[in-house]
Image (cartoon, rainbow, N blue to C red):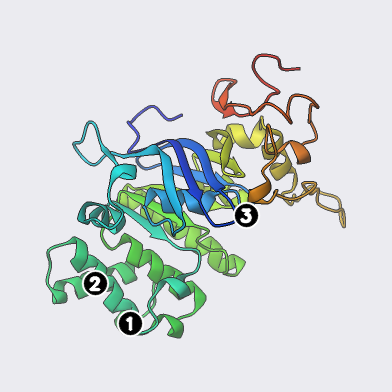
Amino acid sequence: MPSAARPILEVRDLRTYFFPEEGTVKAVDGAAFDVYPRKTLGIVGESGCGKSVTARSILRIVERPGRIVNGSILLRRDGEEAGTDLSRLDPDGSQMRGIRGGDIALIFQEPMTSFSPVHTVGSQIVETIRLHQDVGKREARARALEMLRQVGVSSPERRVDQYAFELSGGLRQRAMIALALSCHPRILIADEPPTALDVTTQAQILDLLMALQEREGMAIILITHNLGVIAEMCDEVVVMYLGRVVEQGPVDAIFHNPKHPYTRALLRSMPSINARVRSRLPVIEGSIPHPYNRPSGCAFHPRCPDFMPGRCDKEEPAIRPVGTAQEAACLLYGEGAR
C-alpha cells in the first residue's frame, strides 16, 4: 500500500445488503480498502460482483430496499485528523449533500440517463456549481464554460446551451466529466466511464481523466471490468467477487503475480497479442451464483480450478497478507494451506 500520505478515504468492513421479499442480497459483504491523494484505485470484477454498489454506498445513494448495515466510510477533509464517517450521516442531510459533488463526485456509466432531458447541459453544470459554491449565475456560467473547455468539448459556447440528446456519445461523456469536476472534488469515482464508446474515444476519455488528475491532484476510484484499463490507469487494484474483496495490492504485483484463483482466471481471459491466430480465449467456467443462492464456504469454489473438497466448500477464507504487498482471501495461503 502507498505510505507517503495518509488515505483520504478509508473503507472498513463495508456491508450493503438489499432486502427484497425473496430474501437478503449481500451486494457488498465486508469490503475494505484505502484511497490515497493523487492515486488511482481500480475496482475490478465480473458484472454483479458489487463494484457499483460499493461506489453508491460511498456516496450514500443506495436505492431501496438496500442499505448499509455495517462498516465505516471515513473521509478526511483538509486539516481533519479524525475524519467524517459517511456511513453515519443522513443520506438526505445537508452535510452529505455538501460532500456529494463537493468532496466526492461520480461519473455514471451512461451519461444519457444522468443528465436531465429537459434542461440544457450548461444549466445543470451551473446548478451544481451554485449548489456548492457561493457564486452568482453569471460567474457560474463562466465557470461552466471553462470546465467544458478544459475537458475538450468543442465550441463550448454553443454546447453549453444544448441538451444531452443533442450531443454525441463522446461529447456527453466529456460533459459528464465537466459536471463531476465543476466543484473540484478531492475524489472522483468513475463507474465504467467509457464503456459505450468506440475504442478511439475510450482512449481519449481515459487520457483526459489522467491529465485532469495530474492537474487537479484528485484521487480516482475507477470501477471497470476492463483489465486493460486497470493496467493503464491504476496504482492499486481491488478484485471483487460476489460482494467480497478476494485480492488487493499494487497493480504490477496483481498483474505479474496474482495470488487468488479468481484473479488468475480474469487475467487469463484477457486477449493477448502473443496468442496464436484463431485460438480461443480461456473462459472462467460456470457463472456467478444467484445472490439468493450464495455457495457455502468460499463463494468462488464452484468455479475454482484449485478447489479443495471439504475445505473450500465449508470454510470462508478471511483476507490476509500474501507476500510483501498483496492480500488475498484464499485457503491456499495461511494455516492449513496445502
Vertical side of 10 occupied by 318: above or below = above
Residue 145, image x and y in percent?
Answer: 27, 74
Q: Mark on residue 120? A: 1
User: What amino acid type is highlighted by mark number 2?
Assistant: Glu
Q: Which mark is residue 15?
A: none
Please state the horizontal and vertical placement of residue 298, each as a whole percent of the image: 68, 33
Secondary structure, mark 3, is loop
Q: Nearer the viewer, mark 2 or mark 3?
A: 3
Q: Which residue is mark 2?
A: 127
Which residue lies at the image location 45% right of the left edge and 83% below the top edge? 165
Q: Which residue is mark 3?
A: 47
**Is the residue under label 1 in contact with that under label 2 (CB below 8 Å)?**
no
Q: Nearer the viewer, residue 225 or 319?
A: 319
Q: Residues within 10 Å of mark 3 (few under 14, many from 20)?
A: few
Q: What is the x, y in percent for residue 93? A: 24, 55
Label 2: how many Cα within 10 Å (few below 14, some 14–19, many 20+): some
Q: Earlier in the sequence, mark 2 or mark 1?
A: 1
Label 2 to label 3: alpha-carbon separation: 33 Å
Where disc 1 sits, the SS reads loop
Is residue 153 among what the camera can see? yes
Residue 332 placement, left or right of 88: right
Q: Are marks 2 and 3 in contact (CB under 8 Å)?
A: no
**Residue 89, x across and y down, in percent:** 28, 47
Q: Which residue is located at x 40 percent, y 54 percent?
A: 211
Q: Residue at x 37, y 43 (%)?
A: 38
Q: Amino acid at mark 1?
A: Thr
Q: Does residue 280 lie above or below 15 as drawn?
A: below
